[in-house]
Structures are given as C-alpha cells and as structure tokens.
Image (cartoon, helix red, strand yellow):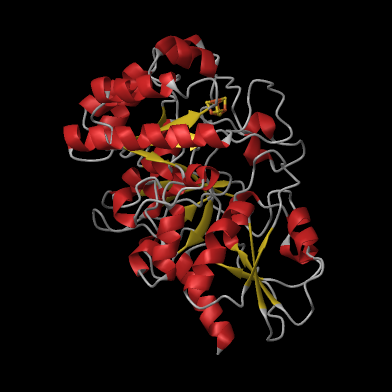
Amino acid sequence: MSAPRVVSVAAASAAQRAGLLVGDELLAIDGRVPRDVIEYRLFVDEADPELLVRRGHEELALLVEKADGEPLGAEVSSAVFDRVRTCDNHCAFCFIYQLPKGLRRSLYVKDDDYRLSFLYGNFTTLTRFTELDLERVVREGLSPLFVSIHTTDPQLRASMLRNRRGATSLRWLAALLEAGVEVHGQVVVCPGVNDGPALEATMAGILDQYPGLATVACVPLGVSRFSGEAAMRPHERHEAVAVLDTVEQWQALFLAALGRRMVFAADEYYLLAGRPFPEAEAYEGFPQHENGVGMARAFAAAFGGDEGAAHGVRHGFFAAVDGAPAAGYRAPRLAAGAVGTAPPDGPVVVLTGEYGQAVLGPLLAEWGFGDVEVRAVPNAFFGGNIAVSGLMAGADVSRALVGVPDDHRVLLPDVCLSEGRFIDGTRLDDLPRAVEVVAGDGLSLRRALETLRR
Ligand code: SF4
C-alpha cells in the first residue's frame, strides 16, 4: 500500500481552506485508508471529513469543513494505492509481449484490474475477479466495465489466455450483467484461432448467454516485429472481408432480436478489406470509439463541424471527474507547456500513421484542403502490421520529416504523445525540426488548418 500524494489543491477549495498542501501524503480519511481513487472520492464526498496526512516527518489531522457532495478540490498522484492487480494470463496475442525492451515501465504492466476498467476503460478478462469484487462493483456502482471475451467457447478461451481459469471466468460476466452493470466486450480476432466458425460461435454464444452486453468490438490482432509467437500473424485481406461479413450478418440478427446492433468491427477491418466505413448512425453513438471502432467516421463528422463527434465517447470514470491523473495508464498527451514551436507560414504537411493517411487524404480533399500534404509515417519501430497514429515513434517521425522544406508547417496529432513523449521515449525536442501538435480529433485539425490559411 502506498499512500497517495496530493499533486494539486484548487484555489478557494475546501481542501485549501483546511490547509492541505501539494506534497502531503494522504494516510486516512475519517480513519479509513482508501485503496484507490474510487474510495478516495467516495470518502471525501462526505460532509466534514477528517484527513490524516503525512507532511515531511510529521503526521497532521486536518478537519475539512465542507458539505456532503461538495468537491474537496484536491488531486492525488495515482489511481490505485494498493497494488494494481496484474493478469495471470499469457495470451499469445498480448501486445505487451511484443514491445521492445527499454520503454517506460508503465507500458509493461499487464493489468487485469476491474478498477482500471472502470477508471480508464481498460479491458479485463475477469480471471482474477472474485465474489468480493462483484459485491464492490455492485455496491459502488462501478459501471461501465470493459471485458475481454475473445470467444465464448470455454476450452478455446482457456487456450487463448493460456490460463485454465479462462474457461470459467466469463461466469463473472454473466453475474455482472445480472446485477445490471453496463459491460462492453471485445474480441481480439486472431486469424486461424478464433475467426471463421469460432467467431460465428462466439456471436451465437453472446446472443444466447450474454444478451445484456452493451456492445462487443471485434478488433484485429496487432503483430509487431518483436512477436515470438509463430502462430500469430496479421489478417490477410480475405480474412478481414470474412470478419466484416460475420459482423454485418450478426448486426442484422442482433437488431432483429434486441433492437440494437451489439457487435461492431474496428476501423482497421474496413481499411484492410477496402470497404467503405458504415455511416455514423450505424455506430449507435460510438460506444467503442476508444477501441478503434468508428474513429474514422467520428473524425470525419467532427471535421465536418459536428462538435459532439469531436470527442467521441470517452470511456471510464475519468471521462467525467477529476481526482487522480491517469499517469501510467492513460496519461495526458502533453506535459504542461510542451508544445511545438510555430514555424513560419507556408504549405502544410500533416503527419499521421499509414491507416490515418488512408482516411485523411480523401477527407481533406473532400473539404477543400487538397493542397495539404498528408504524409504517412511508416512504423519501423514496431514493424509488423502496426499502422495506427497512436503508436508512431519519434524516430519514425524524424525519418518522415526528412525532405520537408523549411518553409512548410508540420502538424502532428497528439495521440502519439504521452506527457510529451513518443512511445520510444523521445520528445518533441528530439525531432529535427519544429512541429505543431494538434489534438487528435477532426474538429481540432479542421480549426488548425483554417487558422493556418488566414
Ligand atoms: S490478459 Fe491482456 S495483459 Fe494479460 S496476457 Fe492477455 S493480453 Fe496480455
């Protein structure tokens, strides 16, 4: 257990009036030791909480005068104060096993913690879920949660997770749904493993056993050049087509049976198959936007001026509430003040991943920005089939900048940054020239391009 440290105290807040300072360690609230930011929020929500804090070598009791439900006004340093529950699976498709050595430590955390599912929208397999966890989820209303299903066949699931508990842990999914918890599922589709008839059986299993699921995303296996699993390979085009056919057939069945589509395919499938994306309405509010489902359509809608689509639907408790920064799990894109230096006026280049280029090129042309160069950044850092903008490495971005004339302005989406650093640990300062960082939604890019034209 490590006590959370106060990282900010809002001006004129109850916390400031009580004398709480940045740097204080929070030991207890009304005699109770919070295990995570969820309990912290619940405890400090009550009227007049007494905080036990450690300041240097001293322990102090601070009585906070505040009404029930009034925000305390203090942010703490982490989300989980006891240990993050790590997974005991060894999935062949796990991306963490496919990372090179030497990246920031938080990237190697194989979390399987329902609290991080609630807080950040991380997916959990439920193989370490317990009766006590279920009680807490229900009692504290920790909803929605995000569950990795992969297959509803118990033996296949145990084999994919390389954990015999994988065969039985979906009983917790049934219990969560029974208790009225909103759950979104995902299937990481591995060609030759859980696609084809196995994917059909999973769809049937969902309709039969888990019809209360909110949504299910089918996402393709990502394979980097560091994968040591011979059986794990990227989809071929005909396999992507087959996944889309399965998803679309089952969408029709779910619509008829439940009145909603339930299952959605990740954008990558449409790009791989060479098919147009479904219309925005077919994503039913983009509930799996953060999982790469409907991002292209939401981006296009936002670029076209739909402000609601600009942000998509953000998962997790932190979508709506402050309390702890997401550092280590989903950190802010840029550290405060870390922005690119504006270069002189000139032609514009937008950097993006190879998938992003396929989406952005036609979109910009459609909206009269055909003169903007959309430059793809091939992902040599990860290799394999990794082509999303969020995994662009600084070294690859540097290579892509070679040959961009000095009088050009270069825009970079912030999705490839975490606290100002690329995934390979390099920073904006390490790039060979200045770039301007733009938020990764369509509306922000549109505004940036319009501003540059003025
Ligand atoms: S459950 Fe997730 S984190 Fe754990 S091994 Fe499988 S893919 Fe990796």
Q: Is residue 184 left or right of residue 58?
A: left
> Where residue 301 appears, x then y in whole percent?
39, 64
Task: Give residue 181's quadrant in the image.
Answer: top left
Residue 57 placement (x, y as % from top left): 61, 46
Work out whether residue 235 or residue 447 is closer to the camera in this orientation and state it: 235
Residue that appears at 46% across and 56% down: 296
Is residue 185 at least partly visible in the picture? no
Where is residue 368 shown, x and y percent of the image?
50, 78
| Residue 174 appears in the picture as rendered | yes
Q: Which residue is more in the foreground, 286 or 73? A: 286
In the image, 297: left or right of 351? left
Q: In this figure, what is the number of numbered marks? A: 0
Which residue corresponds to the image point at 58% horizontal and 30% vertical from the top-left? 110
Horizontally, is 111 left or right of 151 in the view? right
Q: Quadrant of the C terminus?
A: bottom right
User: Residue at the spot x=76%, y=46% of the render?
Assistant: 380
